[in-house]
Amino acid sequence: MASIVCASSLFAHFQTVMTDKSVIEQGSSPKVAVQYEFTHPFEQNSMNMEKPKEAGVFAEGKKTSLLSSFKEVKKGAMTSWTSEYTIKEPGVYQFYVDPVPYFEPAEEKFIRHQTKTIVDAFGSGEGWDKPIGLKAEIIPLSRPYSLYAGNLFSAQVLYKGKPVANAEVEVEFYNTKGLKAPNEMYVTQVYKADQNGVFHVALPQEGWWGFAALMDDDEKIKKEGKSYPVELGAVLWLKTEAMK
């Protein structure tokens, strides 16, 4: 079992994978634009992101790399990335990234957040709860698209394919609306999973929400002759819409 670490809610890091659409309807463009960023989502403060070692889309049990379509984007002085993928047939498509670990000097550790988001194409409706096979992964128990603001979302945290009992899950809103938190403790919401790694979160606002289950990895990374621990994150992003 992975041991769970309590990262400061005041400085929560999130890797993102966000698409320009979560559902592709019949007659609409099959092209999906994907955005990758390493950031503090609510505060909208980005960190530099290197080109990842692995990024792709998982569908019908197979991974397809998207690295050849990656384009660098500057957000101030920081680097983020975009890619594109054209969907050719109905199905559920999981867009994912395994980033180059980021060294955080203040915490003396590397951060590696294995991150995904899920898109339904042409009303498939099947496969959104299938694991990609990432070392750390959040598996939806509620359909992770076509969600209204206010819905309750449920999911399970896995490490090496096994449930993480009592996993601590950080949740943040990707705040492009300029919303203000009452104080800093509201920026990152924190939830505990049960003995089976299952957690439930209500989503009060329309927009993108990120879920990060953080754990100590069983591997270390050497830097300048010293071994440092790795914070391995299972991260999932989903979008809610307002009922109109």
Image: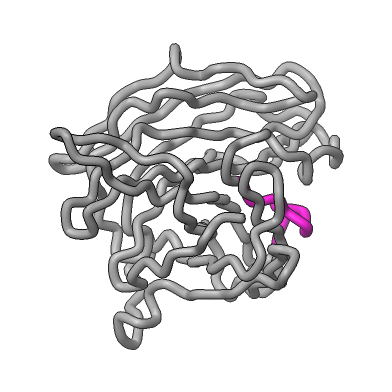
| Quadrant the C terminus occupies | bottom right
x%, y% of residue 104?
23, 50
Please report the residue visible at 35 percent of the width from the left and 80 percent of the height from the top.
181
Q: Is residue 165 above or below residue 128?
A: below
| Quadrant the N terminus occupies | bottom right
Q: In this image, 133 relative to 96: left or right?
A: right
**Does any portion of residue 199 appear in the rendered image?**
yes
Q: Outermost residue toward the top?
A: 68
Front residue of 42 and 113: 113
Instruction: Look at the image and give the residue range highlighted in magenta.
Output: 137-147
Front residue of 163 and 201: 163
Specify the quadrant of the image occupied by residue 203.
Answer: bottom right
Front residue of 208 and 2: 2
Specify the quadrant of the image occupied by residue 216.
Answer: bottom left
Please report the residue visible at 50 percent of the width from the left and 26 percent of the height from the top.
55
Specify the quadrant of the image occupied by residue 225.
Answer: top left
Q: In this image, 10 relative to 175: left or right?
A: left
**Does any portion of residue 151 appear in the rendered image?**
no
